[in-house]
Image (tube, helix red, strand yellow):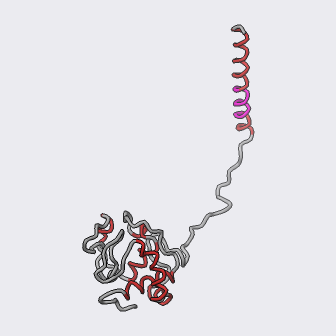
Amino acid sequence: MDGFELNKIIAAILATVVVVFGINKVTDIIFTPDKPQQSAYKVEKIEPTLASASNTGQAAVGIKELLAMGTVEHGEKVFKRCSACHMIAAGGKNMIGPNLWSILGKQTGVASGYKYSKALAAYGKEWSFEEMNGFLIKPSAHIKGTKMAFAGLKKEKDRASVILYMNSKSDKPLPTP
């Protein structure tokens, strides 16, 4: 193959590329679509349902109605998911997570002998029924930067039952609203 043959092959490739791109540009000029001023279909903001709360961690139902959905017995069953990381016994030891005995009514991030994440240690609120409910929905969304890797409890009955169970495991249980 001599240089002339090679030049013809390269010229054919370049001519093909120019023709393809040229046709594309010409059709874009000829066929310009008319875009409407207003969209034909509007996407509305999705409101959170009862099962999933908003990103702020607040439940869609009031705490009184929520706690009425749960029972201590059901909470004991659901808490078994939590027992992989938490103990709930008087004088119990800290595990992967802190011991949760008498946790409701206490300040967040202050259990003795447990190293909390900076976010939870700096949170500075009290574990009330409302606060615990928001945290149990999805801990990482409620307190940004917490090291608790738990997906959360999406069902209101499960959250209410766990809160009631945790409240019953206390030296001084909080009065239920």
Q: Is residue 20 magenta?
A: yes
Closest to the observer, 32 or 154: 154
Residue 142 falls in image quadrant = bottom left
| Residue 25 percent coordinates (x, y) | 69, 34
What residue lies at 71% left-to-right and 37% top-to-bottom? 29
| Residue 157 percent coordinates (x, y) | 51, 83
| Residue 106 percent coordinates (x, y) | 29, 80
Residue farthest along the left direction in this orientation: 112
Specify the quadrant that holds the C terminus.
Answer: bottom left
Closest to the observer, 19 or 82: 82
Report the span colored magenta. 17-25
What residue lies at 47% left-to-right and 88% top-to-bottom? 73
| Residue 174 percent coordinates (x, y) | 34, 89
Residue 25 located left or right of residue 164: right
What residue lies at 69% left-to-right and 18% top-to-bottom? 10
In the image, residue 9 sits, relative to residue 108, either above or below, namely: above
What residue lies at 68% left-to-right and 51% top-to-bottom? 35
Q: Is residue 135 magenta?
A: no
Closest to the observer, 139 or 15: 139
Count the labels in the image. Answer: 0
Residue 76 located left or right of residue 15: left
Residue 133 falls in image quadrant = bottom left
Specify the quadrant that holds the N terminus.
Answer: top right
Magenta: predominant secondary structure element?
helix
